[in-house]
């Protein structure tokens, strides 16, 4: 379940039919993360699969900057003994 920080905007056509929902960017990312963890991947439309892939790639790239090299960690542990 996603709790949006900003109310979505609903767009209707001239007949009153809902045709579009506009979300804040952060709310949209939260929605995609929720889909990634809760939805059946095989039934998601391709455009949502692509969007989820992109946010997961971005997360991996940002985590890579925070990653520590295992050899460095092990070397530091040996020196600390």
Image (cartoon, helix red, strand yellow):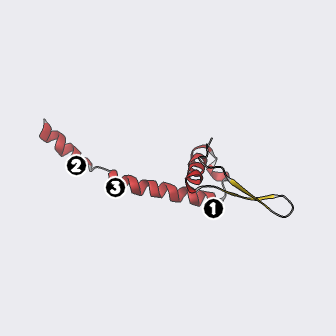
Q: Residues within 10 Å of mark 3 (few under 14, many from 20)?
A: few
Location of the C terminus (image quadrant): top left
Foreground of the two, 12 or 73? 12
Residue at 60% x, 55% y is 24
In this image, 77 relative to 10: left or right? left
Q: Secondary structure at mark 2?
A: helix
Which residue lies under the disc numbered 2? 71
Indicate the position of residue 31 as horizontal and vertical percent values. Answer: 60, 49
Indicate the position of residue 38 as horizontal and vertical percent values. Answer: 61, 43
Decide: is 56 above or below 38: below
- First-in-chain label (2 vs 3): 3
Residue at 58% x, 60% y is 50
Q: Secondary structure at mark 3?
A: helix
Q: Residues within 10 Å of mark 1 (few under 14, many from 20)?
A: few
Tell me the distance, in whole angstroms, between the alpha carbons under discs 1 and 3.
Answer: 28 Å
Location of the N terminus (image quadrant): top right
Q: Which mark is residue 65?
A: 3
Which residue lies under the disc numbered 1? 47
- First-in-chain label (1 vs 2): 1
Looking at the rendered image, the disc whose residue lies closer to the viewer, 1 or 3, is: 3
> Do tag 2 and tag 3 residues touch (Cβ < 8 Å)?
no
Tell me the distance, in whole angstroms, between the alpha carbons under discs 1 and 2.
Answer: 40 Å
Indicate the position of residue 8 as horizontal and vertical percent values. Answer: 67, 52
């Amino acid at each position: 379940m996603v709790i949006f920080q900003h109310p979505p905007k609903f767009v209707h056509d001239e007949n009153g039919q809902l045709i579009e929902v506009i979300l804040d960017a952060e709310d949209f990312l939260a929605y995609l993360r929720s889909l990634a963890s809760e939805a059946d991947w095989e039934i998601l439309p391709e455009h949502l699969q692509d969007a989820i892939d992109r946010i997961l790639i971005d997360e991996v790239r940002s985590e890579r900057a925070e990653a520590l090299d295992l050899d460095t960690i092990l070397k530091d542990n040996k020196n600390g003994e």
